[in-house]
Image (cartoon, rainbow, N blue to C red):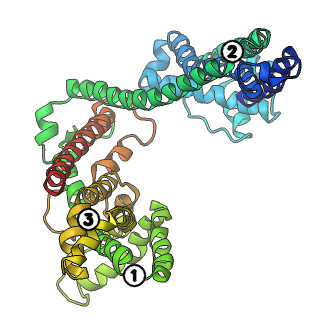
């Protein structure tokens, strides 16, 4: 049974449990809800939550853990020849998983029956041809061993799914029946439901914390593994970025300095564009614009935040880049010959700055509007002009929030990928020329993990080291901004 059907059945049981539990509470009280400890709806919610929540929690946990268990069972049986042919155990397991998913898809589309998928024993060429007819592309290294492992993968997964279905539905029915039998006029349903909802809220908060912890730990462990294979000094202080995967010739030079420089350079150009324009726009909209102008200009400005970054990247590649070449390139308007191609730091920085304008303007506008009106009235009452009030009272009072808005824009710029890939190029270099092509840490993380990478090699593990470096750098930026916010907040309170 599919996950959708299981969830639908559990939710249907919860709905039925709500009405049945509510009706039982009223019937046990003789139809007089004044004899009940809690409102009738609380009894219904108690039955619904008792049946649905444990079942759904088990479903989520089983769905997350089952693939890990199945892959560990299958990986233990992969022959050494298959691993050697694939290049690593991870790649061999990927091919097994892909073939198993292909068999499932073929069964779903009616290309073969479930029994035929379990007993399939034709040679690899026929298997690829049969699955190719239903849109499943397989690699050229499919062997009889891989097919056998894929069938075992499907068999274990099918058994696990069956057991999960029985347990989840059984727990849902048992929980619903238990809460139904426990319903009585003296049962404190409201207290039970409120405790249950409190635990759900606490669980949601813990999920956010544990997710952050899991991300950090995954970065740390993979970074440590990378530094065991590649010298840390060369990674952190190397000035050359030249990865070369096994079989493509040469050794890899994985110095991060060119990537960090490209990240900072493009982000600085973007902030130079976004901060003044966004801040001035926020001051005008909050302090000088009429209500009619504000009601029109603010939504139009915020439309920029809803444009996908790939559209900004195409705008940089097809419009801004050629325009800059026409101005700064050989034979351009200025005739200075500074720019050879459309991809450059300036191209990506300008477009990224346009993208960041609504982040700065919208947040700054909200922060400026939150400054108490009494501060404006006091300044004007002492004889200050409107512009003096804005410059000497409102902006200092709103400065901590404005710094936060600029920090958000900076974090957005540092983590941007698509605009960099299309607008700045892929060259990792140390240069002060803003018209040179460069790249960033995020762009290289994507390129290093594209395709079937061997995650035991430094060339693949370096992506986690890059991510960890970027995480530490952003964390330091946040701490620095917090220090500035606290310093100025103490000054103006």
User: On the rendered image, what quadrant is the C terminus found in?
Assistant: bottom left
Q: For the point 31% across and 32% down, which residue is it?
A: 461
Looking at the picture, tell me which residue is in the foreground, 282 or 440.
Answer: 282
| Residue where numbered disc 3 is placed | 271
Within-10-Å neighbours for mark 2: few <14, some 14–19, many 20+:
many
Question: Earlier along the polypeptide chain: callout 1 or callout 2?
Answer: 2
Within-10-Å neighbours for mark 1: few <14, some 14–19, many 20+:
some
- Where does the image place residue 314, in percent across and percent down from the top left? 45, 68
Q: For the point 10% across and 34% down, which residue is it?
A: 233
Looking at the picture, tell me which residue is in the foreground, 126 or 363.
Answer: 363
> In the orientation shown, which residue stands out farthest toward the front?
34
Q: Secondary structure at mark 2?
A: helix
Question: Earlier along the polypeptide chain: callout 1 or callout 3?
Answer: 3
| Residue where numbered disc 2 is placed | 164
Above or below, 47 against 260 in this view is above
Q: Give the quarter of the image for residue 219.
A: top left
Direction from residue 117 to residue 366 in the image, left or right:
left
Q: For the point 84% across and 16% down, which residue is it?
A: 29
Q: For the point 14% across and 50% down, which residue is it?
A: 487
Kindly report the distance in space between the C-alpha atoms of the residues bearing marks 1 and 2.
Answer: 61 Å
- Where does the image place residue 340, in percent across and percent down from the top left? 25, 74
Above or below, 474 against 318 in this view is above
């Amino acid at each position: 049974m599919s996950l959708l059907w299981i969830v639908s059945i559990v939710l249907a049981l919860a709905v039925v449990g709500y009405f049945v539990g509510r009706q039982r509470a009223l019937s046990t009280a003789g139809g007089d809800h004044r004899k009940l400890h809690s409102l009738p709806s609380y009894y219904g919610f108690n039955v619904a939550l008792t049946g649905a929540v444990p079942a759904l929690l088990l479903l989520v946990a089983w769905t997350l853990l089952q693939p890990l268990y199945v892959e560990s069972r299958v990986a233990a049986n992969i022959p050494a020849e298959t691993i050697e042919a694939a290049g690593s155990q991870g790649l061999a397991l990927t091919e097994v998983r892909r073939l198993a998913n292909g068999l499932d898809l073929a069964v779903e589309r009616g290309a073969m029956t479930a029994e035929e998928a379990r007993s399939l024993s034709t040679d690899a060429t026929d298997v690829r041809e049969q699955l190719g007819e239903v849109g499943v592309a397989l690699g050229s290294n499919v062997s009889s061993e891989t097919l056998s492992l894929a069938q075992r993968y499907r068999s274990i997964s099918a058994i696990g799914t069956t057991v999960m279905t029985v347990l989840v539905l059984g727990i849902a029915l048992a929980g619903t029946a238990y809460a139904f039998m426990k319903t009585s006029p003296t049962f404190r349903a409201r207290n039970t439901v409120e405790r249950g909802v409190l635990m759900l809220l606490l669980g949601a908060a813990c999920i956010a914390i544990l997710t952050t912890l899991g991300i950090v730990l995954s970065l740390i462990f993979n970074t440590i593994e990378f530094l065991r294979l590649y010298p840390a000094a060369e990674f952190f202080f190397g000035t050359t970025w030249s990865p070369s995967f096994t079989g493509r010739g040469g050794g890899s030079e994985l110095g991060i300095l060119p990537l960090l420089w490209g990240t900072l350079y493009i982000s600085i150009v973007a902030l130079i564009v976004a901060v003044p324009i966004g801040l001035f726009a926020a001051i005008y909209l909050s302090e000088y614009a009429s209500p009619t102008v504000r009601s029109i200009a603010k939504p139009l400005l915020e439309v920029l935040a809803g444009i996908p970054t790939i559209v900004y990247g195409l705008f940089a590649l097809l419009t801004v880049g050629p325009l800059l070449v026409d101005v700064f390139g050989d034979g351009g308007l200025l005739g200075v010959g500074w720019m050879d191609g459309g991809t450059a730091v300036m191209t990506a920085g300008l477009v990224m700055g346009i993208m960041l304008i609504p982040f700065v303007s919208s947040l700054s506008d909200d922060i400026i509007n939150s400054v108490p009106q009494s501060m404006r009235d006091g300044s004007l009452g002492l004889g200050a002009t409107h512009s003096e009030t804005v410059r000497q009272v409102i902006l200092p009072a709103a400065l901590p929030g404005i710094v936060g808005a600029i920090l958000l824009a900076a974090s957005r710029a540092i983590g941007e990928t698509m605009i960099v890939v299309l607008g700045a190029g892929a060259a990792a270099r140390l240069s002060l020329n803003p018209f040179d092509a460069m790249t960033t840490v995020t762009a290289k993380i994507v390129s290093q993990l594209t395709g079937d990478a061997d995650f035991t090699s430094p060339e693949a593990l370096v992506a986690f080291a890059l991510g960890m470096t970027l995480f530490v750098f952003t964390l330091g930026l946040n701490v620095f901004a917090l220090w500035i916010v606290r310093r100025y907040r103490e000054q103006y309170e």
